[in-house]
Amino acid sequence: NAGTEFDLIASWSALRPGDWIVWGNGTFGHVAMAVGYPSGNTIQVWNQNGASGAAWPTGGKVVAQDTCYQSGFLGAFRYKKWHQQQPI
């Protein structure tokens, strides 16, 4: 499902900032953007409707930086253009 514009990342240790990480644990799973590198079994991400962040009055959670865990990790997508070298 990565198509031609994304690389599929299957290894937790290969994650880097900008990757879109997919988890399959829980009823619905989760998707978040990495803002750091993995540190053991955790990684810093930007996400919405995650475990932390203040609840909206109508439900859900605000977008917040959060710590997510490796448990349930299915893989990630890396947008190729974000990580290409720019010509000098």
Image (tube, rainbow, N blue to C red):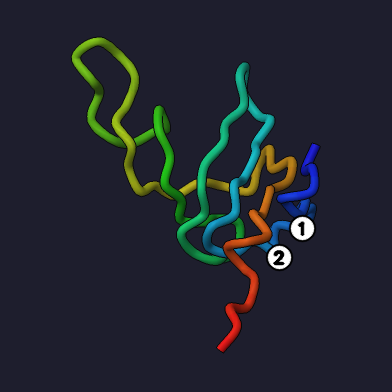
Residue 41 placement: quadrant: bottom right
Rendering coords of residue 14 (x, y %): 71, 65
Q: Residues within 10 Å of mark 1 (few under 14, many from 20)?
A: few
Furthest-front residue in this view: 88
Rendering coords of residue 75 (x, y %): 73, 46
**Quarter of the image containing the N terminus?**
top right
Q: Amino acid at mark 2?
A: Ala
Furthest-bottom residue in this view: 88
Rendering coords of residue 36 (x, y %): 48, 64
Location of mark 1 (residue): 11
Is 2 left or right of 79, judged from the image as shown?
Answer: right
Secondary structure type for disc 1: loop
Front-lying residue, 26 or 56: 56
- The residue sitting at 59% across, 47% down in the picture is 20
- The residue sitting at 69% across, 43% down in the picture is 73
**Quarter of the image containing the C terminus?**
bottom right
